[in-house]
Image (cartoon, rainbow, N blue to C red):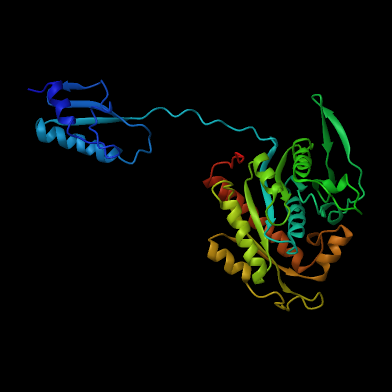
Amino acid sequence: MLYPALIIDALRTVRYPGSGKDIVSMGMVEDDLRIAGNHISFSLKFPRSTDPFIKSVTRASQAAILALVSPDVNVDIAVKVPEAAPAKVEEQPLKGVKNIIAVSSGKGGVGKSTVAVNLAVSLAQLGYRVGLLDADIFGPSVPKMMGVEDQQLYMREQDGKNLIIPAENHGVKLLSIGFVVDKEKAVLWRGAMASNALKQLITEGDWGELDYFIIDMPPGTSDIHLTLVQTLGITGAIVVTTPQEVALADARKGVSMFLGEHVNVPVLGIVENMSWFTPAAHPTEKYYIFGRDGGKHLAEKLGVELLAQVPLVASICKGGDDGTPVVLQNSVSGAAFLALAQTLVQAVERRNATLPPTQRVHTHS
């Protein structure tokens, strides 16, 4: 004859591997033991759904009853774990923005701003609603490269709050500290001042509804990078490098920064800029003046995607100086940037289909 005490005594022989104590004294056997003929049912309580010993303890409990009570009984064991509190959904400051893309580089001089500008314009050319934030507080270059260097910014009031109306050109909305500082003088601000100015451009900009919000980040790693990941949940990052070894070494650090456990921003891929030089008169010729395939090999080594290899042509420099991004010109570099935008869209779609939204970074001093 089956009775509860016999079953409980059998379960006292089952030890929880995490503590070595028996599961009865630990209170893991719920008070829902039922006996119906030769059928026994009860529940085991575990502290969390990810407990590594759930399966082994459940099997051991069943084996103990079959060995010490009767080999002819049917044992039905349910597993119970505390209900998880609903995840708190963080409110993003840019509610109307679908995807936030950080364009970064481990060092200066690799063409990061050129990539950010031409990527933003390329996405606009493809029909997306695009915003561009120049987060390089100490070296803002986006207004000049976008042909709006001397444009005056205005404010508008919404719900009792003054919002900065972004400049707009080539189908892209943009804001930069370059609009409000003397372009002939260096920006001499401490880190807190620069961070606060950047937050203002983000949270007080009248960005509206955007498909892509591109951030031209300063080179290296700094307070600005930390401010950005604390302020925004960044969809993914692009790391720009040239093929030469000194740039690749810094690009590795850039990838490592985003993938680190405290930042945890997905890296969408690497853009190898200045991959080769192509004379305008001979568009099929390639001269590998900075080395060959360095960014490609780095992407393979780090297990991230090579989004594009962008050739160097004279029109890139002229287009940046004239405020006409090279993607608007008929050149091999323009075609490369348009292809980069298309590849990025695909990478973002894959990322959004397989990963949850990135959360803002919370740090403790």
How many numbered discs?
A: 0
Classify 115 as above or below 360: below
Residue drawn 76% across and 75% down? 278
Question: Is 39 left, or right, of 149 in this rendering?
Answer: left
In the image shown, does 194 or 122 lie closer to the viewer? 194
Residue drawn 84% across and 28% down? 157
Question: Is 48 left, or right, of 143 in this rendering?
Answer: left
Residue drawn 68% across and 55% down? 104
Residue 72 in view here: no
Name the quadrant of the C terminus: top right
Residue drawn 72% across and 61% down? 337
Residue 1 % position (x, y): 7, 22
Question: Is 26 left, or right, of 171 in this rendering?
Answer: left
Question: Is 1 left, or right, of 223 in this rendering?
Answer: left
Classify 345 as above or below 303: above
Residue 89 in view here: yes
In the image shown, does 81 or 276 lie closer to the viewer? 81
Q: Quadrant of residue 200?
A: top right
Classify 265 as above or below 156: below
Residue 146 % position (x, y): 84, 54
Residue 285 % position (x, y): 73, 79
In the image shown, does 99 or 178 lie closer to the viewer? 178
Classify 97 as above or below 40: below
Residue 212 % position (x, y): 70, 46
